[in-house]
Image (spheres, helix red, strand yellow):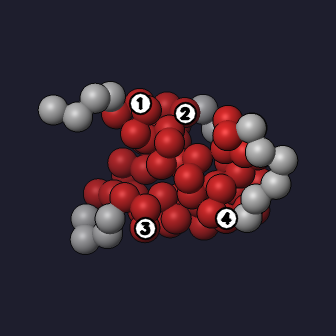
Amino acid sequence: MTDEELLIEFALTRMDNPELDMEEIAALVVRRAGPERMLQFASRNLAARGELRGAMFGSAVEHVLRVVLTLRGPAD
């Protein structure tokens, strides 16, 4: 999944769940992505942080948030 596809998935999930905060939406995206993508997200996050290990779900959620915040651009 590219970063752009991930951003679209996040935006669609946010539209369906406007009452949730960003971290809760990222968690939904990770859960819906399934175990294979969760592992992919977690490994990308750990590589970006220069770490060898970490909790898979938490690292995957952090990756989703990192991508969304990076592609979203600077705050107004």
Which amino acid, mark 3?
Glu
Badge number at residue 3 = 2
Which quadrant would residue 39 be assigned to in this image?
bottom right
* Label 1 environment density (alpha carbons within 10 Å; few <14, some 14–19, many ≥20): few
Percent from the top left, x then y, of residue 68? 43, 41
Sequence-first disc among 2 and 3: 2
Circle 4 residue: 57
Q: Is tag 1's residue or tag 3's residue first in the polypeptide sequence? A: 3
Quarter of the image containing the C terminus? top left
Residue at figure coordinates x 37%, y 58% from the top left: 22
Residue farthest to the bottom? Answer: 19
Residue on which disc 3 sits? 24
Left or right of residue 70: residue 35? right
Q: Which one is earlier in the sequence, the residue at label 2 or at label 1? A: 2
Question: Marks 2 and 1, Cα distance to the nearest angstrom?
Answer: 8 Å
Q: Position of residue 47 (x, y in %)?
A: 74, 38
The amino acid type, in three-letter code, at marker 1 is Leu
Q: Nearer the viewer, mark 4 or mark 2?
A: 4
Query: Residue 71: which disc?
Result: 1
